[in-house]
Image (cartoon, rainbow, N blue to C red):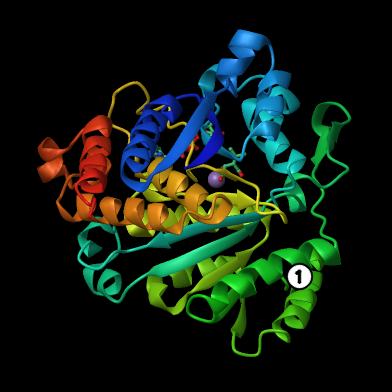
Amino acid sequence: MSNYEIAVLAGDGIGPEIMAEAKKVLSAVEQTCGLSFTLNEYDVGGLAIDNHGQALPEYTLRGCEQADAILFGSIGGPKWDNLPLEQRPERAALLTLRSHFDLFSNLRPAKIYPGLEALSPLRADIAASGFDVLVIRELTSGIYFGQPKGLEGEGEEQFAYDTMRYSKREIRRIAKSAFEAAMKRGKKVTSVDKANVLVCSRLWREVTEEVAKDYPEVELEHIYIDNATMQLLRTPNEFDVMLCSNLFGDIISDECAMITGSMGLLPSASVNETGFGMFEPAGGSAPDIAGKGIANPIAQILSASMMLRFSLNQIEAADLIDDAVLKTLADGVLTGELLSADKRHLAKTTSQVGDAICQHILSSTG
Ligand code: NAD
Ligand code: IPM
Ligand code: MN
């Protein structure tokens, strides 16, 4: 029997609540698929600042290095917002983990499932036209990491700066990820940039065009970020793979999540060139709903499925989870944010949704 060591980093806010459901689901997969998981839990984020004095303690990093994959919840929250940037959970833990493991390729798949168009806030005819997009976001470079970065001077003359920086090598490898993904999907890559203003985007276009030559079957189109955000709402069905730099991908993926109905539906995989990865919901710690048992656990559960698919190569188990999620949504077992105000009294809790997904997995044993 295959056994996998998973580093589980639940983090802050809704992190532990939705992670509890992903753990239940992995247990259902163990019972159904003949796999076994050793889940090693480590503190990260604000919780780790409180318990160990830093957002990414050494023992957490070592645990991740020894694991077959990292399952990450979410981090951050008002309690730690006033720390210096470099100590905040977002930078000290999340960005450090991405950089440490060179997790340059971030996959964020968003789709409106047939029959579930009503979950989308888009106009009914637009939602009905379909939406199935894979955002491929560059995750370890660009303006998030470029140097120099800083704050200088005093008074009204004080100024701040960040550096957007991309090497050809960095663009090439993420562009390849996008074209490889497109070959397995709709064979279209839309590269999002701001080439009318940014030098980085000019180089981004140039390298993307070069990579495209190796994939003659894939159609490549370029779009400016501002136009992309509106076309997504106007004609969402025209997109297949969206290739984005770090910051643009951050923004576009939240928009894609919401087109499907909720931030709580969008999973993500962040992988390096060896296939090692960290798997986490695209959304955050949601302080506005934390502790209430109402967060949607699906993004976390689908992140576990992406872990099985992309790092552990357990495709059947991943399919089983995806299918169970789909059935649960189709059954109308929904957390409140997916329901209109007049139906909100029908909302299920985080753990009821997790239980329903587990039931579908367990009852699928052939
Ligand atoms: P957020 O993603 O936490 O929340 C945005 C909105 O989406 C909120 O209304 C929230 O309630 C809703 N939402 C998010 N996940 C949901 C879920 N599973 N179910 C139902 N609703 C959900 O973004 P924010 O409020 O801008 O950030 C809150 C904190 O999270 C900040 O500290 C931010 O830096 C951090 N953050 C962390 C990550 C991460 O750990 N990967 C990602 C994004 C933001
Ligand atoms: C995400 C988050 C992070 C990002 C933050 C918390 C640093 O918004 O994963 O989308 O900007 O990458
Ligand atoms: Mn984000």
Q: Which residue ends up furthest to the bottom in the rendered image?
A: 216
Q: Residue at x 69, y 71 (%)?
A: 176
Q: Position of residue 251 (x, y in %)?
A: 55, 53
Q: Position of residue 133 (x, y in %)?
A: 46, 67
When the figure is inspected, residue 170 is found, relative to residue 17, above or below; the finding is below
Q: Is residue 287 left or right of residue 24?
A: right
- Residue 148: image quadrant is top right
Q: Is residue 331 left or right of residue 140?
A: left
The quarter of the picture where the C terminus appears is bottom left
When the figure is inspected, residue 156 is found, relative to residue 103, above or below; the finding is above
Query: Circle 1 sits on which residue?
Result: 204
Query: How many numbered discs sit on the rendered protein?
Result: 1
Q: Which residue ends up furthest to the front in the rendered image?
A: 1
Q: Is mark 1 within 8 Å of ligand 2?
A: no
Q: Residue at x 55, y 55 (%)?
A: 310
Q: Is residue 339 left or right of residue 278?
A: left
Q: Nearer the viewer, residue 302 or 308?
A: 308
Q: Nearer the viewer, residue 5 or 196?
A: 5
Q: Residue at x 79, y 44 (%)?
A: 162
Label 1 packing within 10 angstroms: few (<14), some (14-19), many (20+): many
Q: Is residue 191 visible?
A: no
SS assignment at label 1 = helix
Q: Position of residue 115 (x, y in %)?
A: 20, 66
When the figure is inspected, residue 149 is found, relative to residue 14, above or below; the finding is below
Residue kind at label 1, given as amino acid type: Trp
Q: Position of residue 158 (x, y in %)?
A: 83, 32
Q: Residue at x 70, y 34 (%)?
A: 65
Q: Is residue 256 visible?
A: yes
Q: Nearer the viewer, residue 135 or 359?
A: 359
